Amino acid sequence: MEQSGKIIAYYRVSTSMQIDSGAGLSAQQDICRDWAKQQGKEISLEFTEKAISGAAPIDKRPALFDSIYNLAEGDILLVSRLDRLSRDLYGGILIDELVSKKKARVIS
């Protein structure tokens, strides 16, 4: 399926140890950038959340909020794994609904 619109990448690590090591963020960035390259696209915007739990509500996660806010019709919210968006079923449903209302989609 041909993709239109921009790609917005979202990265999240939960602990300060993951921030200090760089492994968590670097791995997520590599996965997302490689996927975009395979699609012949570039990531337009990147948002990073550091030391914030995936169970935290969206109003406590400014980078996730900004990621969704910047979506437009046909855009993709790209994450390395779905658990980067949410560790909570209801939070995941809310995020999916917000992205869908923008007529965008999540790819992991």
Image: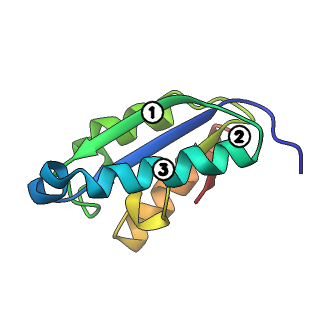
Q: Of discs 3 and 2, which sits in the foreground? A: 3
Q: Residue at x 38, y 42 (%)?
A: 64
On the image, numbered disc 3 is attached to which residue? 30
Note whether 7 is above or below 56 in the view shown.
above
Which mark lies nearer to you, 1 or 3?
3
Amino acid at circle 1: Glu
SS for callout 3: helix
In which image quadrant can residue 48 be found?
Answer: top left
The residue under the point 20% across, 59% down is: 14
Q: Residues within 10 Å of mark 3 (few under 14, many from 20)?
A: few
- The circle drawn on residue 46 is 1
Q: CA–CA distance between discs 1 and 3? A: 12 Å
Picture residue at 30% right of the left edge, 57% below the top: 24
Type of the residue with mark 3: Asp
Query: Which mark is on residue 103?
Result: 2
Residues 35 and 85: in front is 35
The CA distance from mark 2 to mark 1 is 19 Å
